Amino acid sequence: MRPKFRSPHIEPCPSLLAHAVVHRLEPHTDDEQQARRAVDEAARLLDDSLSAVRTAKTAIAAFEQSRLLLTPLPLLPLEVLAEIIDLVNTSNDFQYTRNANGRTLPPAFVAASVCRRWRAAALSRCSIWSYIFVDFCDLDRIDQYLDLMLERSGVQPLNVSFRNIPPDMDEADPIDEQLLITAFSRCAQLQLRFCRGDDQPGPEHAEMTFEHSILPFLQVSMPMLEFVDFYCDECRLVNIAGGTQILTLAPKLKHLRVLGEGLYPIIVPSTLPEIITLTSAGTLTLKDVRVAAAAWPKLQTLAVTVIDSATQPGDGPIEMPNLHRLDYVSPSDVEIAPFLEASRIPKLEHLSVIWSLAGLTSLAQAMSTHIEWRRIITLQLSFIPVLGSDSQGDAQCLAVLGHCTKLTSLLLLQFDAHTLRLVFQALSSTPASVAKLDNMVMEECAFNPEATQAVLNFLVIHRERTTASGPRHRLRSLRISYHLKDESKGPSNTQRFPSWLQPQLERLVPNVDVGDIPRKY
């Protein structure tokens, strides 16, 4: 038999096998790389999505928290919401909002513009609309505004504030006289602030005649009026005819504030029997003070500037049995001893004085004669230049401080560095006068290195002395302040208390405030 043919066995070449395998897998390798890239891209997108989810959850949580705060407001009863709006309306710290045209929006209109519910709350309470604010330089359609406010306020007593009143009402937009009469007749509080009425340079004060001003409307009956505030520093009332009077039909008036010249003489004290507070920045005579004191036995606070102390035969000391606070300015050498008999003002506890040398000497003599002065617990002394250059004036200032042995509050205003140093050196050596001192203020005072060190030394000595007496006798509050406006009248930056020493003050006094404050008119 012929043997069967067998093909020879050929061992495959490894290089050829590898080449074949690689050749066959090449397409699949490309697919794998693409797949890996796709997976990586998907992973990145997933991470981004998870990050977006986490951000969304954080935002939702914050929104939920905010909603928890906001949700109670819409759910508040209208009465409660109206009460809140009313409280904001009466706040002295409220800043008036302005519309897109820059015009002032009174608080009542701001509240009524939030939403329908707030509008319903605002309209539900007449007292919200009883605060009438008119800026003659900033408010359009005054007639329409007054008419709306008078209607929505119902029969509520009004708080009326007029700003930037021109001396001549003919310069202002025409106003229905009946609206003004109605507003004034319903006033409980009235504030009138006058302006020059023009933007042109001229005298320090613009002249204002009674007949062409807004003042004749103050002859209307004002049975609910309790508070009046006149600010007329830029205008002066001139050519006043005899018999001209205002506020004669305001029997409930209790608080009278007159800043400016010419207005106080047309106010008749005998027609205002309920006055308990008088503030007058216009100059008065001692006779004016006597007449006021006789007409106002309930007077509790008196702040006046007196330039003439002429007395008549038989004039005795001025009696003010209920006076608690006296702010007295005497810018010239006026002898005011008849005014200072403490037995005639038995309840006086708060005294503020801005005096020349003669007045300060008179005060020091009165304090040394009458032991009643020792009951003064609040004392404000204001610097007059003669004190810093006259050793006798310094001595009288220190004598006044020495007699007030029950002081709890001391305010020093516009002292120069020389007198300030003497004051604190004296206070350091006479502990009795400040043993109960709780609060101290230095306003517009100048400091040099000697005055600064004298203040620090006093605080150290006072703290050591009062530590043994217990914490209730320690000085708790210290304020050193400068006004933001009229900086030319105050100390320069080099005369201010050095800020780097404030930590020393804070070490010695629990509550310390050093810095600028806005000046109020």
Image: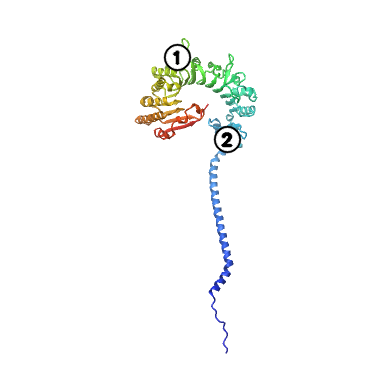
Instruction: Choose top left, top right, bottom left or bottom right for residue 339.
Output: top left
Instruction: Choose top left, top right, bottom left or bottom right for residue 348.
Output: top left
Q: Is residue 23 visible?
A: yes
Give how far across and how far down residue 446 sits, in percent. Answer: 44, 28
Q: Residue furthest top?
A: 313
Task: Look at the numbered disc 1 and give the secondary structure of its residue.
Answer: loop
Cα separation, mark 2 vs mark 1, equals: 57 Å
Task: Give the left or right position of residue 131, taking residue 307 as reference.
Answer: right
Q: Amino acid at mark 2?
A: Leu
Give how far across and how far down residue 120 sits, in percent. Answer: 60, 34
List the residue tagged with mark 2: 78
Q: Looking at the image, do the residues carrying marks 2 and 1 touch, with CB atoms under 8 Å apart?
A: no
Task: Give the left or right position of residue 501, taking residue 268 as reference.
Answer: left
Vertical order, 209 against 74 (above or below): above
* Foreground of the two, 454 or 434: 454
Vertical order, 36 against 114 (above or below): below
Other residues around mark 1 within 10 Å, as few (<14) / some (14–19) / many (≥20): some
Q: Mark 2 or mark 1, which has the lower sequence index?
A: 2
Task: Look at the numbered disc 2 and give the secondary structure of its residue.
Answer: helix
Q: Amino acid at mark 1?
A: Pro
* Foreground of the two, 161 or 380: 380
Instruction: Choose top left, top right, bottom left or bottom right for residue 244.
Output: top right
x 55%, y 53%: residue: 48
Disc count in the image?
2
* Foreground of the two, 355 or 270: 355
Give how far across and how far down residue 18 sits, in percent. Answer: 54, 71
Q: Which mark is residue 317?
A: 1
Q: Which quadrant: the N terminus?
A: bottom right
Vertical order, 392 against 131 (above or below): above
Q: Is residue 220 visible?
A: no
* Foreground of the two, 125 or 441: 441
Other residues around mark 2 within 10 Å, as few (<14) / some (14–19) / many (≥20): some
